[in-house]
Image: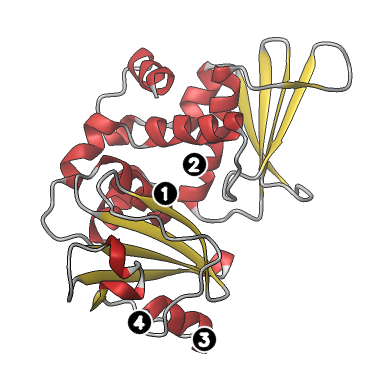
Amino acid sequence: RLAALKLLRDHGVERACDINVEAIASKLGARITFDDLDGATARVIRIGSLAEIRISNRIEEVGWRRFTTGHELGHLCLGHVVAQGTPGEIERVCTPMNPDRRESERAASVFASELLMPEPFVLPFCQTSTITLAPAREIAREFSTSVLASAMRFIELTTARCALVYSELGRVRWIKPSATFPDWIARGRRLDPSSPAFGYHHTGTLDTEPHVLAAEAWLPSDSLDGPNVQIVEHSALISELGAVSSMLWL
């Protein structure tokens, strides 16, 4: 995060509209190209002081392209490289839209998040008393990022008891909780039939309005403050991935 903020300062970024990842890449000696990559969404190659960031032409959404570019810039700035091929040539292949437990991949995504959505700029969007996907969509519009990445950034910075859940085929694939969210929702858990996210995976249609549910639809009863606790679920379809992202708020 500190490396990303320093890079923004060095390039005179003072507002969201100043965050031009192509210009930043150019000043760092990196060229961005779009290509048909097999089995990956991005690749970064550097020979000496020059670098090329190749982005899959399958990525059409602007926010995902920007995040992927920021992710690869993170690898360059943080020195995450693997020696391959000819002497002096380095290359790294990434799929930043998929979860990766490797420390270097995690660090590159954290770098990209801070570069595209700097904490000082994003915090005002997190000062809200009602938690739905609406603040994430405001962040996405302001910073030209995807709603999913924006929702994850909101979760990182809010003080509210909320979490973002990513589900596929009726099961939880991963969860990102805020610091105050009371319990971890297990990966692989089946969605409750009362959840709008379950409705999409079951019927192919998604109710995109916020809904109030019994908190036990998502959390075990022994993790709640008492009986009759409610949770707000606001879900959105990620059509290009066939998945649903759900903002949960106690």
Separation of marks 2 and 3 at Cα, in angstroms? 31 Å
Separation of marks 3 and 4 at Cα, in angstroms? 12 Å
SS class of the residue under badge 3? helix
Relative depth, front residue between 185 and 242: 185
Please give the name of the residue rendered at 89% of the width and 17% of the height, measured from the top-left corner.
86
Please give the name of the residue rendered at 52% of the width and 30% of the height, measured from the top-left corner.
107
State whether residue 31 is above or below residue 139: above
Determine which residue is flagged by label 2: 67
Q: Mark 2 or mark 3: which is in front?
A: 3
Disc marking residue 207 = 4
The amino acid type found where label 3 is placed reads His
SS class of the residue under badge 1? helix
Relative depth, front residue between 54 and 196: 196
The percent coordinates of residue 135 (x first, y second) are 23, 55
Determine which residue is flagged by label 1: 149
The C terminus - image quarter: bottom left
Q: Quadrant of residue 120?
A: top left
